[in-house]
Image (spheres, rainbow, N blue to C red):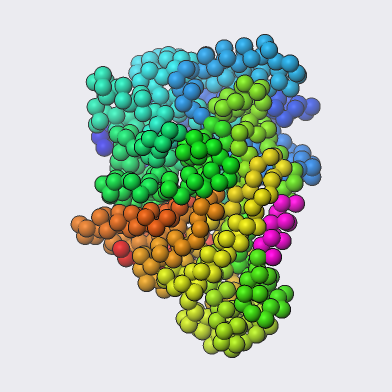
């Protein structure tokens, strides 16, 4: 990277831009306002308080100067709302990727004209209210952009001023215009209160601008990379203000490659530049995802593996061969399924037309096994597994009942960027083409390993009873040391290509999928089971005693779709073989197989080629989603003791990467416990 980009990067990494921030004591006249009017008032007030701020040497502007977004509801008001309906997380729109492309192409002035025409035809007060609020939101964005343009002119920042004279009023003409416009739109969504706003398939909707600039000679590959790297840096300016379970969990994900709606491969020069930019910058945003298939050239996988080697947890792979047919089985059209991207972490969503809530709840597989272990009177393991299936159905019934009424707080401005909302004069919070609910499945390997213990020692060997097993786990194996050793070392573990335990996992995931099949949710969608864990891998584990696989009380599950912690694994090939046996098209909400490789795997020249071959093996085996992380356990332990020396050490947490020293200790400890393998 050149000196200008290095300087911008240092500014953001060192936080020298943060003194421009201030906290506002919001006092907004919210009483008596509808939810839509509240959202609009808060958005307009937020943007009105924002003041133009410029980083030295930048060409892409817009930096947050107000740290706190207005709270539009008191705690008592939210409690009252939750008495009448289920509101996920903060209750507002989240985990969504809008359709940026149309607005980038035509500009906000044209979108205003479109909305005004629709307003003249509006038939009902709710329609008129919604359309008027979208217009107010657009005007607030344009007002801030105009103030930025004027401030840039006054400061002699002529290139920024020239860009802002074109966008966001008019459509983008150049790659720089498009990136600045995207920055404005994405920045604005956070100011409205939405969060985990994905950037989607940028190598598709931004590619025409880059292609035109390259063909005209306005840009070279080198100068295009510079502009792209600046945009990537801009995603990190304010990311510490974006909410999440932990710092870094902010949903700024991009998806590269894959096929388009017609089935044509899309990997292009912009895809390559994105991989290179992320590799050079080594920052946590944007999160890089890469769509692959059996037809993906090995050279592309090797380029992507160079990013893995950089140690920042990117890219996360998604396999078109599994994901696309899996989505069509759930009711997505083939064209929309081909256009999938990811939500904040890994959940598969459709940009622009999807209003899925892909992480609305989760099922703890070990909790299901624990319940059955305490209640079953099965005389055979097959009968015990029948009880597990019944308990999975019971758990699904409970979750479905809890979600019988689900509401989302309005987002008038984000609705401008979502297909069909203006045409229907309907806020996206009321739904879109797809309104499905995603259900995570946590602790698969703990549950499968526990069931393997039960199968062998209770039913096959008849060495103990279910009652004795319950007594041991309730005692956290205190005074049961021999039993603990037996369970940990003399029972098959998932990840070692042992078909006995792997087939239990196949049955468990099939039963999980069956428990949700045919159910319709309250918003007209379906339920999508998946293999992700999100933050539940710690929460669910904390709610359980010890488990029959030898896990002690308080020890977390593995994150996502991975072997149990501290289980000896023969190697990455056996791990991939085990975890590609299940019927993954049936659990396509998302949830990556997570493999930790010791960073010494890349010490020799053939390291990249070997790891790329691992990815190829995973794809050919029919895996659905994969992340490979280069880690060094000793370095992580050192970082816990001397965080000041490792402020910029990046780790993959679950579906996102963050700075290790900024994570709470339970998350740090879980990462340290993960299994290190050698390629």
User: Is 602 above or below relative to 129?
Assistant: below
Question: Range of the magenta residues?
Answer: 390-401
Does 427 sit left or right of 341 as displayed?
right
Does 418 sit left or right of 304 as displayed?
right
Q: Residue at x 60, y 16 (%)?
A: 115
Q: Quadrant of residue 629?
A: bottom left
User: Is 180 above or below relative to 579?
Assistant: above
Q: Residue at x 26, y 54 (%)?
A: 608
Residue 115 shows in the view: yes
Q: Report if residue 397 lies within the magenta region.
A: yes
Q: Report if residue 502 lies within the magenta region.
A: no
Q: Quadrant of residue 72?
A: top right
Q: Nearer the viewer, residue 208 or 568?
A: 208
Q: Residue at x 42, y 15 (%)?
A: 166
Q: Residue at x 39, y 28 (%)?
A: 206
Q: Nearer the viewer, residue 102 or 218?
A: 102
Q: Quadrant of residue 547?
A: bottom right
Instruction: Pinpoint residue 573: horizontal percent, then vertical percent.
Output: 35, 65
Q: Nearer the viewer, residue 330 or 307?
A: 330
Secondary structure mostly seen in magenta is helix
Q: Quadrant of the N terminus?
A: top left
User: Is 271 above or below relative to 454?
Assistant: above
């Amino acid at each position: 990277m050149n000196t200008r980009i290095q300087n911008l990067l240092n500014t953001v990494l060192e936080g020298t831009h943060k003194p421009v921030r201030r906290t506002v004591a919001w006092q907004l006249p919210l009483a008596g306002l509808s939810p839509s009017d509240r959202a609009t008032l808060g958005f307009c007030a937020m943007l009105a308080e924002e003041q133009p701020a410029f980083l030295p040497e930048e060409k892409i502007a817009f930096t947050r100067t107000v740290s706190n977004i207005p709270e539009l509801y008191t705690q008592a008001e939210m409690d009252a709302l939750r008495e009448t309906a289920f509101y996920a997380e903060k209750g507002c729109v989240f985990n969504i990727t809008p359709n940026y492309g149309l607005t980038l192409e035509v500009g906000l002035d044209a979108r205003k004209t479109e909305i005004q025409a629709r307003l003249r035809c509006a038939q009902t007060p709710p329609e008129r209210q919604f359309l008027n609020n979208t217009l107010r939101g657009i005007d607030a964005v344009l007002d801030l952009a105009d103030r930025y343009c004027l401030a840039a002119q006054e400061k002699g920042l002529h290139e920024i001023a020239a860009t802002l004279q074109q966008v966001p009023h008019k459509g983008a003409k150049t790659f720089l215009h498009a990136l600045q416009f995207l920055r404005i739109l994405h920045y604005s969504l956070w100011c409205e209160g939405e969060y985990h706003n994905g950037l989607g398939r940028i190598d598709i909707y931004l590619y025409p601008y880059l292609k035109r600039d390259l063909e005209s000679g306005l840009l070279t590959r080198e100068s295009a990379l510079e502009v792209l790297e600046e945009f990537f840096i801009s995603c990190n300016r304010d990311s510490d203000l974006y909410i999440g379970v932990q710092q870094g969990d902010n949903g700024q994900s991009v998806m590269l490659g894959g096929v388009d709606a017609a089935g044509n491969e899309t990997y292009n020069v912009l895809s390559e530049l994105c991989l290179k930019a992320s590799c050079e910058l080594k920052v946590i945003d944007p999160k890089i995802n890469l769509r692959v298939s059996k037809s993906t050239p090995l050279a592309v996988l090797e380029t992507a593996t160079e990013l893995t080697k950089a140690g920042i947890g990117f890219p996360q792979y998604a396999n078109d061969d599994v994901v696309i047919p899996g989505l069509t089985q759930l009711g997505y059209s083939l064209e929309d399924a081909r256009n999938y991207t990811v939500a904040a972490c890994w959940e598969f969503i459709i940009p622009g037309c999807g209003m899925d809530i892909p992480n609305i709840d989760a099922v703890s597989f070990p909790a299901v096994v624990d319940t059955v272990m305490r209640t079953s009177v099965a005389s055979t393991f097959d009968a015990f597994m029948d009880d597990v299936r019944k308990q999975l159905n019971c758990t699904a019934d409970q979750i479905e009942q809890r979600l019988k009424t689900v509401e989302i707080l309005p987002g008038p401005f984000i609705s401008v960027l979502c297909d069909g909302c203006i045409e229907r004069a309907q806020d996206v919070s009321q739904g879109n083409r797809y309104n499905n609910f995603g259900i995570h499945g946590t602790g698969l390997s703990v549950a499968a390993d526990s069931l393997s213990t039960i199968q062998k020692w209770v039913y096959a060997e008849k060495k103990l009873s279910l009652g004795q097993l319950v007594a041991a786990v309730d005692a956290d194996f205190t005074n049961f040391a021999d039993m603990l050793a037996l369970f940990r070392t003399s029972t098959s573990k998932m990840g070692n290509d042992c078909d006995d335990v792997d087939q239990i996992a196949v049955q468990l995931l099939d039963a999980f999928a069956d428990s949700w099949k045919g159910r319709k949710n309250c918003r007209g969608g379906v339920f999508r089971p998946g293999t992700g864990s999100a933050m539940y891998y710690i929460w669910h584990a904390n709610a359980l005693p010890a488990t029959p696989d030898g896990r002690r009380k308080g020890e977390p599950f593995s994150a996502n779709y991975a072997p149990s912690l501290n289980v000896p694994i023969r190697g990455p090939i056996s791990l991939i073989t085990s975890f590609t046996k299940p019927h993954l098209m049936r659990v396509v909400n998302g949830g990556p197989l997570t493999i930790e490789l010791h960073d010494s795997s890349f010490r020799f020249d053939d390291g990249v080629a070997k790891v790329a071959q691992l990815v190829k093996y995973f794809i050919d085996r029919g895996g659905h989603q994969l992340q490979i992380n280069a880690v060094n356990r000793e370095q992580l332990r050192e970082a816990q003791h001397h965080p000041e020396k490792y402020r910029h050490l990046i780790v993959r947490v679950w579906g996102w990467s963050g700075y290790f020293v900024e994570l709470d200790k339970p998350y740090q400890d879980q990462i340290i416990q993960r299994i290190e393998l050698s390629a």
